[in-house]
Image (cartoon, rainbow, N blue to C red):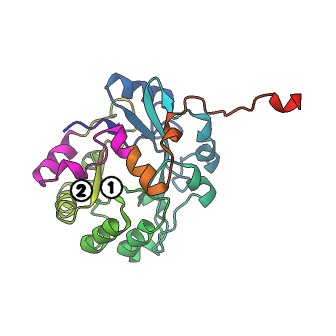
């Protein structure tokens, strides 16, 4: 399976990642990818950038050196009501939003009910993907959550990085992937890269999905066109949004001639 769209990456806007946006984009180009999403951690993570970082992604073209560059974030689910740590104003400007649970952003309240946390965040119209939910530290009712993902036309991520950093994820992710296949739930396979050396590293996740018998039609990041078409359909974007190589939108001086 060829995955030509990388949906989950971090840059040195977070101090626990090690390369710039430009370096990540150039690495994607070297690897023959069509698309890379820049999805730095939202502010509840201690070393995450300020919310202004996400608001000002408008300064970044959505097409650089022939590569689509999605303006994104990995938001933190902060309670069982499914609230996340970016404002609606910011979320409305982003192309792609992953919602995840992280140790560093946990509250005692959410720990009581991970199932409802996931179900409620799936109802947020700005959220596209549930990130690395195979983490065994945050148990939830797989059946209920995946049925809600199907109902909301949302995406479940199989995260290659989890298999190195979140021990025990392999078995859970296999169960999740297999049930996604049975229910027809959309999926992405991502690297969760924190450096250029991890971009597009998805070999374990790809093998797991293969063993789970996933129909490739359910994998939304096999091409830039497939992912962008999904975002346009679900969020009402015009495809021209992603062809913009000049982010500034500066006015002409015609108004001065009137």
Give the label on residue 194, or none: none
Please say if the residues under marks 2 and 1 sit with CB atoms less than 8 Å apart: yes
The residue lying toward the viewer, choosing from 195 and 202, is 202
> Magenta stretch containing residue 211, yes or no?
yes
Residue 103, compared with residue 47, is above or below; it is below
The range drawn in magenta is 203-227
In this rendering, does residue 158 appear at all?
Answer: no
State the residue at coordinates (45%, 74%). Answer: 80
- Residue 44 in the image, given as x and y percentages of width and height: 54, 57
Q: Nearer the viewer, mark 2 or mark 1?
A: 1
Give the label on residue 132, or none: 1
> Magenta stretch containing residue 204, yes or no?
yes
Left or right: 89 as drawn, with respect to 173: right
Where does label 2 land, which residue?
169
- Residue 165 in the image, given as x and y percentages of width and height: 30, 48
N-terminal of the pair, mark 2 or mark 1, is: 1
In this rendering, does residue 62 appear at all?
Answer: yes
């Amino acid at each position: 399976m060829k995955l030509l769209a990388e949906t989950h990456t971090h840059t040195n806007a977070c101090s626990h990642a090690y390369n710039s946006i430009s370096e990540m984009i150039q690495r994607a180009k070297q690897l023959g990818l069509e698309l890379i999403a820049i999805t730095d951690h939202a502010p509840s993570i201690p070393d995450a950038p300020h919310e202004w970082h996400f608001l000002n992604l408008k300064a970044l073209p959505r097409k650089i050196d022939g590569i689509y560059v999605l303006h994104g974030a990995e938001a933190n689910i902060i309670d069982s009501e499914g609230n996340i740590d970016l404002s609606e104003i910011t979320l409305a400007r982003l192309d792609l939003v992953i919602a995840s649970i992280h140790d560093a952003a946990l509250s005692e309240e959410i720990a009581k009910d991970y199932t409802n946390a996931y179900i409620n965040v799936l109802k947020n119209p700005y959220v596209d993907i549930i990130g690395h939910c195979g983490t065994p530290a945050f148990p939830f009712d797989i059946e209920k959550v995946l049925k809600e993902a199907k109902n909301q036309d949302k995406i479940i991520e199989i995260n290659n990085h989890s298999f190195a950093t979140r021990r025990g994820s392999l078995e859970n992710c296999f169960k999740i992937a297999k049930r996604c296949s049975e229910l027809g739930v959309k999926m992405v396979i991502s690297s969760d890269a924190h450096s250029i050396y991890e971009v597009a590293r998805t070999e374990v996740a790809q093998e797991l999905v293969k063993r789970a018998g996933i129909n490739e039609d359910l994998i939304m990041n096999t091409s830039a066109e497939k992912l962008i078409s999904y975002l346009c359909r679900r969020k009402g974007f015009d495809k021209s949004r992603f062809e913009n190589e000049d982010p500034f939108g500066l006015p002409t001086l015609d108004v001065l001639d009137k």
